[in-house]
Image (tube, rainbow, N blue to C red):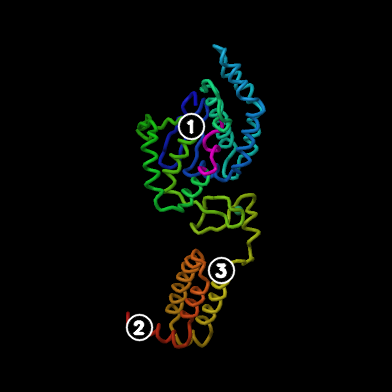
Amino acid sequence: MEKYLRILDTEDEFILLMDNMEVGFTYGCFSTCIVNTDFNKMHDIIKNYLLQIPVPDLILKISNRKRNKDDIVKMALRKLKPLIFEAMEKELLNSNQANMITMLLMDEIIHIILSCKGETADIDDFIPVVFRYDEFHNYVRSVLLKDNSQISEFLSGLMTATDIPSSVMTDQSGFSCQYYQVENLFQFILLDLHKSFKLRQVNECEVCHRLFIPKYRKSEMYCSFNNSACKKMMKGKVDDPFALEAKNARGYQSQRVNNASTQKKYDSSFLRNLYDKWSADCGRLCKEYRLNDDLTSFKEWIASTKFTAKRLEEEWEDYNNSK
Ligand SMILES: [Zn+2]
């Protein structure tokens, strides 16, 4: 970019500073938005626009100019801005954030065109890096979902190699934070991934497969986009055999500890603790077995931990012995 994008890191969010604008992004928000945006759609919109100008003619036109090169390029690209804005996934963004990202993408394209010298080989070279390669898009997705154990080291290495200029900035009140100057959105995404990798939980919605930042629990499975359409769709609908097994087993176990004869025989806090512990194990194992796609073992575990009369007696004995 002609002007560096300046970023303040407040240890809670990034504040992007550009011209007179100041827009905050919580860690992971920017990367998640880029990943949720349809890569092919955005890539094609930019590419088709650049082909239609066409860019080589534009470069030829500005090459003879001494002044106002920026304005000529901006003029030629003016109709691209609303197209980019429209194609961007905005569920996680407020309007300032959506405008800021659109501006940054536009600036990056303008900058690439202005700094192009001589022959233009490939139109793809004019597309901002974050929408140039779909492998990169997939990579960012896997980093956000922490799919790869070596990613943390790889990211640190990449950060060091990229060498983003940074310094510490302190305001009048004595509050200090890290200050970065990045050249393009690729560098910003690196910063964002680096921060969010350790600090931010990002999940994939099981219905629409877009990524989201869970609000209440780390284990949330559905996004709240579009007025929680995915949550509403899945409400009361159990189409996952693991969840169905867990639900049935919970019903059985709860009935076993709550029926009148059991309640008469044993201490109620013993029964409650026993059930709660089992239920927590059940939730954890349901996830683990689902990951390994091993329904048989999950069913076996459920069968082996049923609160039969004999098992309740044994647990009761252990409970009294451990007192
Ligand atoms: Zn969803």
Q: Identify the image quadrant of residue 64.
A: top right
First of labels 2, 3 by sequence position: 3
Q: Which residue is mark 1?
A: 184
Q: Element at badge 3?
A: helix
- Region of the chain picked out in magenta, as a range: 126-136
**Disc 1, ligand 1: is the CB inside 8 Å?**
no
Residue at left offset 51%, top offset 41%? 30
Query: What's the residue type where badge 1 is placed?
Result: Asn
Q: Is residue 323 visible?
A: no
- Figure check: 202 above or below 164: below
Vertical position of residue 81 compared to residue 70: above or below: below
Q: Is mark 3 within 8 Å of ligand 1?
A: no
Q: Nearer the viewer, residue 62 or 300?
A: 62
What label does residue 174 carry, if any? Answer: none
Lateral position of residue 269 relative to residue 80, left or right: left
Label 2 – label 3 distance at C-alpha: 33 Å
In terms of depth relative to the viewer, which is nearer, 307 or 186?
A: 186
Q: Earlier in the sequence, mark 3 or mark 1?
A: 1
Give the number of the disc on residue 243.
Answer: 3
* Marking on residue 320: 2
Q: Which residue is at a point 61% across and 20% down the rendered structure image?
A: 58
Q: Residue 91: x and y, percent?
A: 60, 45
Q: Is residue 222 left or right of residue 306?
A: right
